């Protein structure tokens, strides 16, 4: 049986589901000859570490307790009474402690550092873990969209890093692109809808509903971030576009991408309150969107918020697409990706499915961990 | 630099393209830290082996020569004059020689045995290679659709075998299913169109053309096997369905699948000549197909030749599908696969694209080889 030690950074929605998946997959993974040994978990306030990372682990009862506590919105600190099970470190000591653990484990058993946080502050610990020879699995987009130098360090050993769940949740997007790349089939173009929220919004306005109403509906259905401008700005799609673009070898940064926001600068979070945006700002956007939808419809086209990577261009924004194309047919909140290459020339390779949700995102992370099992003894 | 020794069985269309891809990917693979060292190639008549498999390889000039000779339809034997480059073995000695080589290399550098033949006779050498600790990469469906016992031996070490190109050519079907399986997301159902030929035929008859005419058109366009009954029998789709079904853990054999043939037994190759089938037999099938297409159309549905894996059922045959479903929308010769699981529950995960062609099939094989690189020192 192959033992793979894991430290999990961030046990909110995705991280919590990952712990549940790890526990419920015990017998399945045993059949595959693998055992995931969770030796540490952290949230923004604390790090819990097995009392001896070589011989002990956070057992399944304890991991279930972590899931329960985090589901209830509490901090990991509340588990510090399980003093026999683990050591508890405050956030200020967490980074040093993870690095210490990585230093010790990397030389013997190896270690996977899994980042399911949404923080930009894990970069330091991740880059050091890479240097120490650890494997890295990310659901967190921030480290991959940082400055080029930091990115280069992070992916310096491509076989030791996986980040499927940063784009399209569990959809096999990065894995498929890596296969195409390693077979020497040059990727000419990627066109994709990578936001379930904007996918829902754009397919609803197509039916004639006012943009403002659709955004408010999406918000009340829980499809948007608490402030829908976080979706409408296109920044989330831009981060995913940047991750794909860099995977294809482009030397680009977030601020060099062309990003279309669906609201003007003067309605931004720094200039207008959320209440004002929802009650009056949004209404001012209805006409423009409606006109664009109608103009597209005159040519038999539909508006989609897409990411386009072609040549040196990486862009995200609204595009008119043929109603009868794979992206034009997209309805609801699915993600879709069309890849054009030598092998997929006139007809693209298309991958489509749910591109959000804690369950599927965590499943993607778990598949990533299993995918690097050959690097462990 | 990681050196991965490769022996290629079968250098017809796919194998020949694989050799070309290997040569043209040299600098790309060097950047990935990998060098594929082709130490042997075989066709149905002979095996060419590097003069010393530890220190020598079949160099790129020689591999290009192999591609050229096979493109011209000649046998590898014609290369036996390159006596400084390699040893030449007749077919009768090939199996023993491959096993000898596998025995010697597996203990030191490891070896990938790649089967791009269409033969059912490679099973013996593959199973022995597995026993010896070699890795196996297959484009050949036959070994995976043999008796259950043989299959079990072949996949006894799941990390050491890849066979992406047996289903949907280079489409990332098996890789994606493996990801879903390893993440513990239970696959409830797979519905797929896995024959470009039958996809073309069924979308053309939908437009009102007679079945017989469409089949003859497909034959003259080179979309079918020389005897179109090889496609119309559904056996090729059935083999792919069996491979997927076994991947999902079903203990099934080819003869336990429900397979619908598009021609009756009395028109089979043993009962009717190809000429008679094309000139008269086919015409007798037109009415039935036309009636079924029309009946489906009355319900807003279309006929598709599909593979369905659900519960203990694995079936291939014609099904009525909603016109507006992913499979119903399929046109032309693309392959498409819809996967339903816990994570992809109401909306399936869909993978679509070209599912045939030597170039893309060989690209899938090459991606498979690169995917097992971590098993080599």
Image (cartoon, coloured by chain):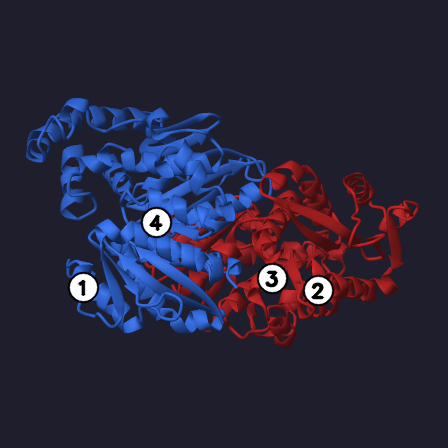
Chain colours: A red, B blue
Residue B60 coordinates in the image, percent (x, y): 30, 71
Distance of mark 4 from mark 3, alpha carbons? 28 Å
Of residues B55 and A363, the one nearer the viewer is B55
Disc marking residue A177: none
Residue B241, relative to residue A175: is it above or below?
above
Disc marking residue A107: 2
Where is mark 1, residue-wise?
B69
Q: Secondary structure at mark 1?
A: helix
Q: Residues within 10 Å of mark 4 (few under 14, many from 20)?
A: many
Quarter-wise, where is residue B263 in the image? top left
Q: Residues within 10 Å of mark 3 (few under 14, many from 20)?
A: many
Of residues B269 and A194, the one nearer the viewer is B269
Disc marking residue A161: 3
Chain of the residue under label 4: B
The reply to the same-chain question for discs 2 and 4 is: no
Where is mark 4, residue-wise?
B139
Distance of mark 2 from mark 1, alpha carbons? 50 Å
Residue A69 coordinates in the image, percent (x, y): 83, 43
- Judge whether residue A336 can be spotted in this image: yes
Distance of mark 3 from mark 2, alpha carbons? 18 Å
Chain of the residue under label 1: B
């Amino acid at each position: 049986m192959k033992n793979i030690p894991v430290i999990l950074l961030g046990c909110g929605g995705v991280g919590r589901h990952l712990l549940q998946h790890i526990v419920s997959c015990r017998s399945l993974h045993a059949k595959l000859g693998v055992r995931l040994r969770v030796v540490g978990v952290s949230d923004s306030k604390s790090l819990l570490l097995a009392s001896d990372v070589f011989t002990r682990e956070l057992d399944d009862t304890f991991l279930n307790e972590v899931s329960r506590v985090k589901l209830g919105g509490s901090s990991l600190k509340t588990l510090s009474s399980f003093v026999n099970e683990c050591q508890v470190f405050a956030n200020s000591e967490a980074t040093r402690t993870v690095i210490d653990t990585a230093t010790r484990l990397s030389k013997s058993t190896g270690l996977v550092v899994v980042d399911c946080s949404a923080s930009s502050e894990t970069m330091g610990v991740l880059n050091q873990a890479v240097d120490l020879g650890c494997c890295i699995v990310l659901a967190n987009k921030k480290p991959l969209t940082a400055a080029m130098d930091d990115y280069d360090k992070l992916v310096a050993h491509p076989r030791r890093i996986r980040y499927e769940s940063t784009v399209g949740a569990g959809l096999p997007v990065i894995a498929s692109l890596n296969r195409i790349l390693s077979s020497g089939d040059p990727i000419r173009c990627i066109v994709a809808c990578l936001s379930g929220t904007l996918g829902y919004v754009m397919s609803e306005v197509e039916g004639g509903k006012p943009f403002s109403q659709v955004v408010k509906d999406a918000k009340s259905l829980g499809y948007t971030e608490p402030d829908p401008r976080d979706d409408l700005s296109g920044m989330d799609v831009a981060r995913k576009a940047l991750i794909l673009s860099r995977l294809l070898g482009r030397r680009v940064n977030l601020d060099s991408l062309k990003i279309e926001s669906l609201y003007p600068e003067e309605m931004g979070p720094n200039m207008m309150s959320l209440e004002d945006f929802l009650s009056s700002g949004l209404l001012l956007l209805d006409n423009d969107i409606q006109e664009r939808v109608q103009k597209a419809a005159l040519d038999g086209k539909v508006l989609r918020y897409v990411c386009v990577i072609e040549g040196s261009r990486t862009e995200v924004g609204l595009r008119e697409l043929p109603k009868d194309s794979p992206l034009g047919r997209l309805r609801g909140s699915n993600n879709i990706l069309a890849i054009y290459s030598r092998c997929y020339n006139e007809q693209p390779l298309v991958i489509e499915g749910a591109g959000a949700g804690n369950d599927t995102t965590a499943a993607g992370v778990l598949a990533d961990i299993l995918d690097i099992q050959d690097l462990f003894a």
